[in-house]
Image: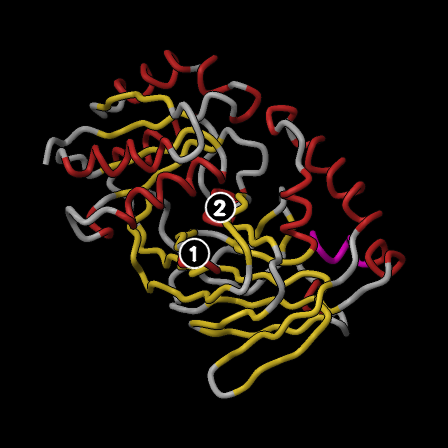
Amino acid sequence: MNGRWLVVANPISGQGRAMHHRHEIAATLQRHGLAHDFVVSERPGHAVELVARAIAQGCRGVLAVGGDGTVHECANGILGQQAVPSAEVALGVLPIGTGNDWARGLGLPKDFGGVAALMASGARRRHDAGLAELAGGARRHFVNVAGLGFDAHVVAQLPDRSLGPLAYLVSVVKGLLGYESVPLQLALAGRSIDARAFVLFFALGRYCGNGMNVAPRAEPDDGLFDITLVQALSRWEVLLCLRRLFDGTLLKHPKVISLREASARVEAGPLPVEADGELIGLAPVRFSVLARALSVVAPPKQ
């Protein structure tokens, strides 16, 4: 074990903040006694490779500098490698992306000094991971929320993410105009649910989509998904429901079904699937929880 952190920066997160503040980030880590190697992700999937390679060389701490997508790739690097058990590698984030929903759910600090102090203190929490097994044999891990339906439709329509939160809002509005609810079957242990779904979430964390509270009761270390199925809504019903997406009352809507399961399969046509805000493939898809598979840099659970 080499005692050095791998700091993985996404150069487009937060409209380029990672690279603009690179020297400040490095200086802050050094002040807190955190030896590190600073690397830059150059393409989609590159961070997965960088993390897996560093772990094989003895690294046991990874700091994602970016948003949920950067965390997603770093987590896949940790969970996909075979050198050591995944929970032996600490995963932290300096949240400078657009949504930072995973960091929001864990109550992580936003400032450089706060994150560095947390890293140096040795504060760790065990955290579940999700596994999505997709059509064609593809597999992808995730740490926050995966979704099908309108959620994935919006992600697929996103323009240049470097434009910031406005890009997501524009995609939501545009997506709503052309979106139709989708037929699917949710297969659970001993039963199944057939529905026309506006959106279906498999949540480990509580937030996605830049602050939408889609799973208000989710706990990231309980070994279960909080599954939120929003059944078909008219456009007018969607507009009336927008407040519920953010204020934690979504589960009270009469067209929302809330479940807690360790695994489930979604049978559907070739629907896009997103995880942690990234398109990962097409349904049908099976989701399962890897209980407490990660060790994350986070304050104690409140």
**Residue occupying image coordinates x 21% and y 34%:** 53
Comes first in the chain, label 1 or label 2: 2
Compared across the picture, whether 6 is left or right of 217 comes to: left
Q: Which residues are magenta?
A: 241-247
**Residue occupying image coordinates x 39% and y 40%:** 73
Question: Which label sits on residue 253?
Answer: none
Q: Residue furthest right?
A: 236
**Residue occupying image coordinates x 42% and y 72%:** 262
On the image, numbered disc 1 is attached to which residue? 302
Q: Residue furthest front?
A: 136
What residue type is disc 1 on?
Gln
Where is residue 200? Give x, y as percent. 63, 63
Q: Quadrant of residue 47?
A: top left
What residue type is disc 2 on?
Trp
Q: Quadrant of residue 43?
A: top left
On the image, numbered disc 2 is attached to which residue? 102
From this view, report whether residue 91 is shown above or below residue 213: above
Can the viewer see residue 33 in this picture? no
Residue at disc 1, secondary structure: loop
Q: Residues within 10 Å of mark 2 (few under 14, many from 20)?
A: many
Where is residue 149? Give x, y as percent. 67, 58
Cα separation, mark 1 vs mark 2, equals 16 Å
Q: Nearer the viewer, residue 8 or 296?
A: 8
Q: Nearer the viewer, residue 225 or 50?
A: 50
Where is residue 290? Give x, y as percent. 34, 63
